Amino acid sequence: MKRITLFVFIIALTINQFAQAQDPKARQILDAMSKKYQSMKAFRANFNQTLENTTSKVKENLEGEITVMGNKFRLKTEDQEIINNGNTIWTYIKSENEVNISENDPDDEAMTPDKIFTMYKKGYKSAYVEEAKEDGELCDVIELSPEDRNDPVFKVRLNISKKDKSLKSWKMFRSNGNRYTYTITNFAPNPNVDNNYFAFDKSKFKGVKVIDLR
């Protein structure tokens, strides 16, 4: 089963852990991007994830949808759904009709979708790389590198629209040779969702097996 390494999405969708020695130009662009998304009550995005490892000759593609509201998110892919209400995480595995329930750990160092737009603020250095076009749109390319040399993610490269400061795509480089590329294919600010959307409703999944790991 393909698994998404959360928006290690989500920068990896997932930016509350990045940069003390900041390039002023890069920081200005990152701050503008962060302000844009944090001003929204919620947002929904469709994305493509590509995993590549040239050594292992691996290339996998995954499509998904993510809805984020504050520290809550709901992530849907072909194989599974992950729901996090800030306290509890439900992981629903479609092929098994099974949901695993666990406690959310806010101190978990794994990148999560609600952090994607603030992770640059602590623990990483940022640098302005260049201007580049993505789907015909001019973007600023920003590179983040960890201050911790033991961090398995040794580089993250972001493409941020010059026009509206939206995050168009990002690429994450891991020390094991894996390269994850995330591309936003559709974005909707402030969708009509409430707190109930960020909880697993057992009645909507007939016969589901519940495994409580709390």
Image: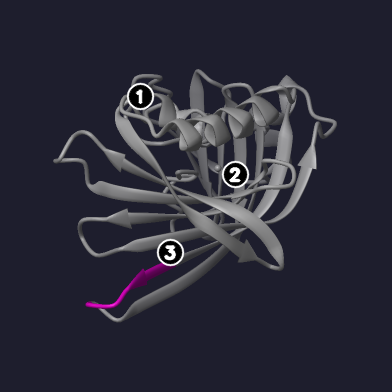
Per the image, label 1 sits on a secondary structure element best described as: loop
Per the image, label 2 sits on a secondary structure element best described as: strand
| Quadrant location of the C terminus in the rendered image | top left
Image position of 94 with respect to 208: above or below: below
Using the numbered discs, state the Cα–Cα distance from disc 1 to disc 3 in whole angstroms: 33 Å
Image coordinates for residue 136, horizontal then vertical, percent: 71, 68
Q: Nearer the viewer, residue 210 or 176?
A: 176
Rendering colour mode: one colour
Residue 163 marker: none
Residue mark closest to the camera, 1 vs 3: 1
Residue drawn 24% across and 77% down?
Answer: 56
Amino acid type, label 2: Leu
Q: Is residue 187 magenta?
A: no
Say whether residue 213 is visible. yes
Q: Is residue 98 left or right of residue 160?
A: left
Q: Which stretch appears magenta?
A: 51-55
Q: Residue under circle 3? A: 1
Q: Earlier in the sequence, mark 1 or mark 3?
A: 3
Using the numbered discs, state the Cα–Cα distance from disc 2 to disc 1 in whole angstroms: 25 Å
Residue drawn 28% across and 47% down?
Answer: 153
Q: Residue under circle 2? A: 75
Q: Earlier in the sequence, mark 2 or mark 3?
A: 3
Q: Provide the major secondary structure of the magenta segment.
A: strand
Image coordinates for residue 6, horizontal then vertical, percent: 45, 45
Amino acid type, label 3: Met
Say whether residue 102 is visible. no
Q: Residue under circle 1? A: 122
Residue closest to the far left: 150
Q: Residue 8's quadrant in the figure?
A: top left
Q: Is residue 53 magenta?
A: yes
